[in-house]
Amino acid sequence: SKSAKSTLVSPGPPVYLDLVYIPNHSNSKNVDVEFFKRVRSFYYVVSGNNSAAEEPSRAVLDSLLEGKAQWESNMQVTLIPTYDSEVMKEWYQETHEKQQDLNIMVLASSSTVVMQDESFPACKIEL
């Protein structure tokens, strides 16, 4: 018997949003090419700073490129990482030319908020 390929997003027309937080720390178990083919946004927030758990996942970042390549329009997309991870750095460097071709801009994640005894990365989003 044939096994049907499962998709994480039900079939139908694409959904357009201004801002999307990629779910589950950008883990590839929850986000694939179909997600980016269907959930189209001007801004995607990529969280995750756990290399042992593969977060953010290189597969998710590659899925963004593959999914966006299938969009009818070449609208600008901004990727906003909340952490400056090695996975993000390597992906950015290795796919920079393709990002430019697909009109994808990646913002740097260099701001830090310090509150009492805790500090964490922060990003500012202007819509």
Image (cartoon, rainbow, N blue to C red):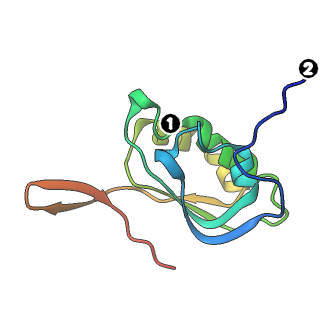
Q: Is residue 93 left or right of residue 64?
A: left
The residue tagged with tag 2: helix, strand or loop?
A: loop
Residue where numbered disc 2 is placed: 1
Farthest residue, direction front: 1
Q: Is residue 109 left or right of residue 18?
A: left
Report x, y in % for residue 127.
52, 79
Farthest residue, direction right: 1
Residue type highlighted by circle 1: Glu
Locate residue 29: give its quadrant: top right
Residue where numbered disc 1 is placed: 90
Residue at the image point whose x is 81% and y is 34% from the top: 5
The residue tagged with tag 1: helix, strand or loop?
A: helix
Farthest residue, direction bottom: 127
Q: Nearer the viewer, mark 1 or mark 2?
A: 2
Residue type highlighted by circle 2: Ser
Residue at the image point whose x is 39% and y is 27% from the top: 52
Q: Name the foreground residue: 85 vs 120.
A: 120
Residue at the image point whose x is 42% and y is 56% from the top: 108
